[in-house]
Amino acid sequence: MSTNERPTNTLFIEVSGSGLPEVDGLFVPSTAPAAESESGTVSSLGYWNGKMAWDRADGKCERSPALSYSNSYTSWRICRLDGHLAYDITTEDALPPTDREWHVYKKGVAPAPSVVIHHFDPRQPLPEANVLFVLGGPGSGKGTMCSLAEAQLGWTHLSAGELLRKECEAGGPTAATIEKYITTGEIVPHEITVTLLKNAMEKATRTTGQLNFLVDGFPRSLDNLEGWYDVFGREAKLPKMLYFECPYEELEKRILGRAKYSGRSDDNVESLKLRFDTFKAKTLPTLELFKRKNNVVELDASQSREEVYAPFRASLHAFTDPALAAQPLTETSEMLLGLRPYPKR
């Protein structure tokens, strides 16, 4: 790839936890002038040896770029303030690895740091996300459709229920409270749910650049909606809601079928009844509020997956990447639609 074809380096690198504190900090796209590297490669703005490169945000390192790739040693490397190499990792990856342990070089001090890639400058507020709320009774298929949008159309699926279950499994300070509400089919306090959603959205945006979010299973009550306003502000545009409508008899049939493999404590008739009663009492008023604002897309979830997917996909069209929207169904998408069997374990 020629220097003219290279995408602009707009990524930011956060380095933390090193045994040499001076190395820790934010690294920004390098502005070093064109120069010839040790391997004879001529650099370009934001690049070194054909890969992206970064300077320290505080400008204190004598070497520029301070985080770059070496063709001679096929490794990424991070420099000390005096320009000497402190940490490296041997790889041909296009970007500095974030999932493997770095090596402490002879001018470094253990432990090696952790590296996080940000798609937006962490010193600045994040751009506004495109959010759609997704509601429906338990077993209505909204989770499957959201997974399809993630696999096929590049949206990020955030399940409020799944975030709560993971938080519960992690054993945090709110775990016992979450477990109590989930088991009884009641709605978890919005202070917990909205905080988990906000943190997950911010993490996904910063680390992947993703701005399209399907928030599955929220808001489940008017109180939930107030919690959303508390965090995101009343002046922000209220997300549109996608509502999956499905008769109770069909929901029961699906939940009992799912219980055979889901392992979820609430996949049983008793919990389903409690959840459905809660849904009617507390969630339907929220749906009615969105209807009055002409802000709901209703989907007949009693149909086949393919029949539901067509209008669901159309409702996401305005924000979906055209290239992803035009691509054929992936294998994962075909499995989610029931057009291809899942591999045998």
Image: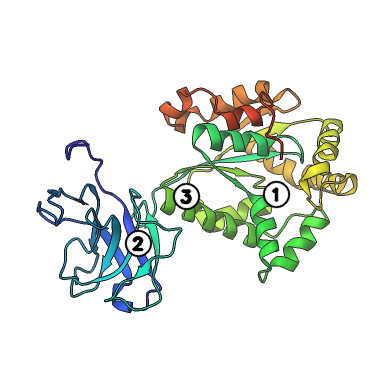
Q: Amino acid at mark 3?
A: Glu
Q: Nearer the viewer, residue 221 or 208?
A: 208
Residue sitting at x 73%, y 62%: 178
Q: Which residue is mark 3?
A: 235
Distance Cα–Cα, label 3 vs label 1: 20 Å
Q: Secondary structure at mark 3?
A: loop
Q: Along the polypeptide, which appears first: circle 3 or circle 1?
A: 1
Q: Secondary structure at mark 1?
A: loop
The location of residue 114, given as percent across then percent down, is: 41, 66
Residue sitting at x 64%, y 54%: 163
- Quarter of the image for the C terminus: give it: top right
Q: Is residue 292 visible?
A: no
Residue sitting at x 43%, y 48%: 208
Which disc number belongs to residue 221? 1
Distance Cα–Cα, label 2 vs label 3: 46 Å
- Quarter of the image for the N terminus: give it: top left
The location of residue 290, given as percent across then percent down, is: 63, 38
Q: Amino acid at mark 2?
A: Ile
- Asked if the residues shown at circle 3 and circle 1 are in contact, with their CB atoms under 8 angstroms apart, the answer is no
Q: Secondary structure at mark 2?
A: strand
Distance Cα–Cα, label 2 vs label 1: 49 Å
Q: Where is residue 182, by image quadrant?
A: bottom right
